[in-house]
Image: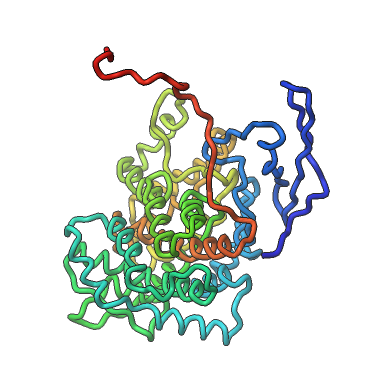
Amino acid sequence: MTQTADKAETFTLTDNRTGKQVTLPVMKGSTGPDVIDIRKLYAETGCFTYDPGFTSTGSCESQITYIDGDEGVLLHRGYAIDDLAEHATFPEVCYLLLNNHLPNAAEKEEFESILRRHSMVHEQLTRFYSGFRRDAHPMAVLCGVVGALSAFYHDSTDIEDPVQRKIAAHRLIAKIPTIAAMAYKYSVGQPFMYPRNDLSYAENFLYMTFGTPCEPFKVNPVLSKAMDKIFILHADHEQNASTSTVRLAGSSGANPFACIAAGIASLWGPAHGGANEAVLKMLEEIGSVDRIPEIVRRAKDKNDNFRLMGFGHRVYKNYDPRAQVMRKTCHEVLSELGIKDEPLLDIAMELEKIALSDEYFIEKKLYPNVDFYSGIILKAMGFPTSMFTVLFAVARTVGWISQWKEMIEDPVQKIGRPRQLYTGETKRSFVPLAERG
């Protein structure tokens, strides 16, 4: 891995307890904030840093994704997300994240062929689904089935073998839409649909999800294009909770299938992958454009626990660049499906208008994020809300596996072992049972 940091500059701390000065290297990336290298801080001072949520801590060096939250910038390997969503296909973005360059025509054809060849799952794996209750949440099914892949594909679990790492990456990217579609089919009691090699990645997913053996299923090109963009917009997002989970699990030497299952489990949390579902629920609860003034007043009231979902972001302090692409896609999908009077969209448009013009929202930098529109699109396409986070996982798998691969190949990376600020009891003498009050 190429080291991009420059340690020429330093950062000096003064320990007020002892008066000792500690000099720490300052590392410079290719862009973005400088980073203070604190690896020797404990040895020099006897202190750790305290950073709940790791919001001020860089856990790794990465060349995959760059985010400038203040400016609303998201780059994958240097390419702007809106350029990729407008001009590339999801498999091209997958190739980019894995290989650090966009594929040429021959590489694109070969990569898409590899994904098609790996899109089927082991036939015995299909029986695995019958062990779940019919009403099991699709994310529970996805997490369990992906974790079970290591029991079916022993020839790609040796993380020390670069060939096996590559095969595992291809398998996960290719099979995750099949596994996700099967989870949906199982939940509605319909037969599984096998992937077709004449369809694109997004087309195949829609075919396996909504097609049936009873009649030919023609994939709507507008919907497949929208699905492709949704996948692109969710492909990777730097060191978020689920990606950090994948890296942490992988740092112990766990196989890639187990690591991706860990990422899926983390994504399942409503504060992470369930945000678009929460947006849809909020819009449904608002019910009418007439109620928006009341809702906005509540959002501004610091004594009211209510908060608008789909506004603001942990990282972005500007307009989420993915949201602009998603907004355009939302209109295209609703127009194609003939949905002209969609109350939820009317509410969303009015909320967006207020958020971009109201001084309170501007001051607080509460701009619409990618989750604000994606739930409306997915609902219009026919996906139940229980599948929303599953679709997120399908898209994010390539980001997870790319980050995992980079972590494995990084000679500096160690097993993850965060430290703590202990505030519990100090050493106590053991009290015999008969003497305890």
How many numbered markers are drawn?
0
Could one spot residue 335 in this view of the protein?
yes
Instruction: Give the percent coordinates (x, y) of residue 353.
Output: 50, 45
Relative to 382, 226 lies left or right: right
Residue at image location 74% in from the left, 26% down from the top = 15
Image quadrant in which you'd find residue 41: top right
Instruction: Give the percent coordinates (x, y) of residue 76.
Output: 60, 63
Instruction: Give the percent coordinates (x, y) of residue 88.
Output: 55, 73
Q: Is residue 294 above or below residue 287?
A: above
Could one spot residue 327 in this view of the protein?
no
Residue at image location 47% in from the left, 29% down from the top = 300
Q: Is residue 189 above or below residue 201?
A: above
Position of the N terminus, as image quadrant, is bottom right
Residue at image location 33% in from the left, 42% down from the top = 288
Relative to 18, 191 lies left or right: left
Q: Is residue 45 above or below residue 227?
A: above
